[in-house]
């Protein structure tokens, strides 16, 4: 276990020093919230500034968990780094576990920074438990996308993994209503996506003070599916790397 944690710490340091991570995972969501977070309209029954806070925190967390991770894993597999790790005392799933731990830790700053902006710049007023619940829900969503990143990274080569991860990320964020609230037929379609449900859980917590179990069940179903895909990808490529 110590080897896994050491590898996770190294991965965290590498991610936090990455300029792409700083720009797209932390910088972009914060800038977008500063630009549009004070709109006086409403979305999903709450003030737009509260909805947009949840959406931008999710954008940063999911970007960090999926797009960067998928490409790094694929590149390390191509370079033979994963093969090298297999001749060390590291446990069989130590590499994958370290990636997930690092991903979960490095998504925290993007979530916290936007929530802090929501409180002090957007003047979003919430009970302490609501802040914690919203952060945990977004963090749970990041875990699902970290698992998907492993599935993509193990299955595809770097020049293919990057556009696939980007396509999934953009599709999930746009069709899931992270960039703007959805209504009508598009809103109905979005109900099956984890990105939409994460946003709606947040707005339900703010507007109604409730924690909708049916929405959580949809997110957990996607999480289970992505974990299964990751396990399948790791096992199917075990003899090739």
Image (tube, rainbow, N blue to C red):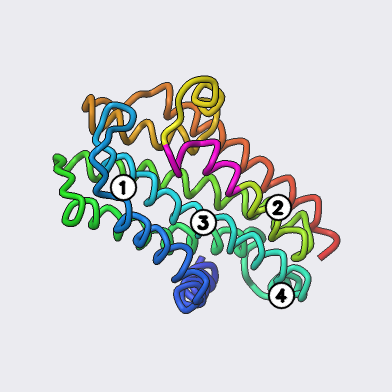
Q: Is 174 within the magenta? A: yes
First reached walking from the N terminus: tag 1 or tag 4: 1
The residue wearing badge 2 is 164
The residue wearing badge 3 is 63
Q: Mark 3 touching mark 1, by CB under 8 A?
A: no
The kind of secondary structure element at disc 1 is helix
The residue wearing badge 1 is 53
Q: How far apart, in angstroms, are the residues tagged by discs 3 and 2?
A: 13 Å
Q: How far apart, in angstroms, are the residues tagged by discs 3 and 1?
A: 16 Å
Q: Which residues are magenta?
A: 169-180
Q: Is 136 within the magenta? A: no
Q: How far apart, in angstroms, are the residues tagged by discs 2 and 1?
A: 27 Å
Q: Quadrant of the C terminus?
A: bottom right
The kind of secondary structure element at disc 4 is helix
Q: Position of residue 215 (x, y in %)?
A: 43, 26
Mark 2, Cα crowd under 10 Å, few <14 / some 14-19 / many 20+, is some
Judged by depth in the image, the label closer to the viewer, 3 or 4, is 3
Q: How far apart, in angstroms, are the residues tagged by discs 3 and 4?
A: 24 Å
User: Can you tell which quarter of the image residue 48 is in?
Assistant: top left
Q: Nearer the viewer, residue 73 or 178?
A: 178
Give the residue displayed 62% in from the left and 64% down from the top: 95
Give the residue displayed 46% in from the left and 69% down from the top: 23
Q: Position of residue 161 (x, y in %)?
A: 72, 58
Q: Position of residue 7 (x, y in %)?
A: 54, 72
The kind of secondary structure element at disc 2 is helix
Q: Mark 3 touching mark 2, by CB under 8 A?
A: no
Reply above or below: 81 against 202: below
Judged by depth in the image, the label closer to the viewer, 4 or 2, is 2
Give the residue displayed 38% in from the left and 23% down from the top: 213
Q: How far apart, in angstroms, are the residues tagged by discs 4 and 2?
A: 22 Å
Mark 4, Cα crowd under 10 Å, few <14 / some 14-19 / many 20+, is few
Q: Residue 81: which numbered mark, if any?
A: 4
């Amino acid at each position: 276990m110590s080897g896994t944690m050491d590898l996770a710490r190294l991965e965290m340091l590498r991610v936090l020093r990455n300029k792409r991570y700083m720009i797209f995972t932390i910088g972009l969501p914060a800038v977008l919230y500063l630009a549009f977070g004070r709109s006086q309209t409403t979305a999903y029954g709450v003030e737009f500034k509260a909805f947009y806070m949840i959406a931008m925190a999710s954008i940063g967390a999911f970007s960090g968990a999926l797009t960067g991770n998928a490409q790094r894993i694929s590149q390390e597999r191509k370079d033979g780094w994963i093969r090298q790790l297999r001749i060390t005392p590291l446990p069989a799933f130590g590499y994958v576990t370290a990636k997930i731990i690092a991903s979960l830790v490095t998504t925290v700053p993007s979530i916290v920074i936007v929530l802090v902006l929501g409180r002090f710049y957007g003047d979003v007023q919430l009970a302490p438990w609501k802040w914690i619940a919203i952060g945990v829900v977004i963090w749970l969503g990041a875990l699902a996308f970290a698992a998907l990143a492993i599935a993509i990274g193990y299955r595809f080569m770097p020049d293919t993994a990057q556009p696939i991860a980007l396509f999934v990320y953009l599709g999930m964020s746009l069709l899931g209503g992270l960039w703007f609230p959805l209504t009508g037929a598009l809103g109905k379609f979005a109900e099956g996506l984890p990105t939409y449900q994460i946003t709606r859980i947040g707005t339900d917590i703010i507007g109604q003070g409730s924690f909708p179990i049916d929405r959580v069940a949809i997110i957990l179903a996607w999480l289970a599916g992505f974990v299964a895909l990751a396990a399948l990808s790791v096992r199917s490529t075990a003899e090739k790397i």
